Amino acid sequence: MASPSSSSPPPHVKYQVFLSFRGEDTRLNFISHLLKALKDRGMHVFFDEDKLEKGEQLSQSLSLAIANSDLSILVLSKDYASSKACLGELSHIIDRKPNPTDKHIVLPIFYHVDPSDVRNIDGSFKTSFEEHDSKRQSDEVQRWKAAFAKVGKLKGWHIRGCKFDRSETEYIKDIVEYVTKKLMNGMSRSTSDELIGIDDQKEKIIRLIEQEDCRVIGLWGMGGIGKTTLADAVYKEVPLKFENSCFLQNVSEKIIKQGRESLRNELLSELLNEKKIHIGTLSIGSPYRERMNNKKVIVILDDVSDPDQINFMGVKHFGRGSKIIVTSRDRQVPNNGGTNEIHEVKKLNANDSLQLFSTFAFKQLNPDTDFQNLSIKFVEYAQGNPLALRVLGSKLYKKSRKEWETEVNKLRECAQPHFFRF
């Protein structure tokens, strides 16, 4: 089955990997080597080394660990199904699969067993389930059987254990590489380098968009905090609800370079599907206003420095149900720009900060063991600022420990973090 070094995890601890196995079959060889390889790659792994068979229900600590894990590895050995605790874990994991919003990954490893025996509940597994049938309620056993058979249909690794097979060391290397890629690709949670730690904020903004009376939403925060990233994540998720959309980046900079009339013409051309709109006056003429009023659109005005820039773009003329998201470093911009809701983009917490830093410094989700303490120092310096974490991590990639220590000493000499000037 599955505990990290402690058997009762805190309720909100996240794990990259939940490891389920039958201890008597595998603990002293394959599992110990796999566990070490996963931890060496900086992964936070939950495994239950005690394998205690405690009553009818899956313990709360195990249920929380499964719910808070990105990926589950099920090591199916010949006596796996003889353990009601293992079957409880497996069925709990499989119960997550039908939920379309849950992107939990399940990876079976068929360890010295035939995958067809798992699918068909044959061989030693048939014997184990017959014993459960004679001792337990039939509906519970049927639930275990259904989940077990589903696992047998999933793609995974088949470690035969015969003399012509590859070594277990080679299999473990491949498995760890596969798990690392899956986690880094963000297939379980938002763990791509740009999206770490923004899920809760993204969902809040999407809920605001769904409110009928909320037309203009302001996102504000210090430079590098992730305003554009958050706006882009929302923008990519909701366009099908609108007739047209436009993401206008670097509004203030573009107004300086090309003038506000030119930028407004660019915006209207995109939203009205008309090439080279040219409005040279301060106000928008009635023919265009009427067309705008019939369009339900979503617009992102990124990096706005003056509330007048919002009004000049003519956002009030768009049709019923249109949504405008404005990002700015200055809270007074959304305050005075006619916004219905204002959201301060939050700093990353310590766990998300460490993950984001690690994706740039190590190209994995957590720091190498030897660099753990040094990584924490850099993360503390960044104070939850995503841009600072990316810059620091990129600078340290493939650097020696001595170089890391030199950089830490440089940071200590700075009275104020550089990113406050971004």
Image (cartoon, rainbow, N blue to C red):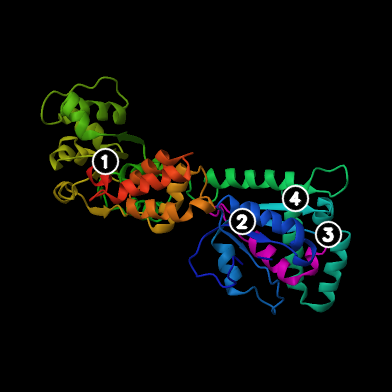
- Write down the residue under mark 3: 121
Q: Residue at 62% across / 53% down in the picture?
A: 38
Which residue, given by chain and number where applicable, does mark 1 sit on? 319
Disc 2, SS: loop
Q: Please provide percent x and percent y for residue 198.
A: 39, 51
In the image, 30 versus 255, the foreground residue is 30
Q: Position of residue 101 (x, y in %)?
A: 53, 53
- The Cα–Cα distance between marks 4 and 2, rounded to whole angstroms, is 15 Å
Question: Quick one: label 1, few (<14), some, or many (20+) residues within 10 Å?
Answer: some
Asked if marks 4 and 2 touch (Cβ < 8 Å), the reply is no
Q: How far apart are marks 2 and 3 (CA)?
A: 22 Å
Tell me which numbered mark, 4 or 1, is placed earlier along the sequence.
4
* Quadrant housing the C terminus: top left
> Compared to 316, does 120 lie above or below?
below
- Amino acid at pointer 3: Ile
- Residue holding disc 2: 98
Q: Is the C-beta separation of discs 4 and 1 under 8 Å?
A: no
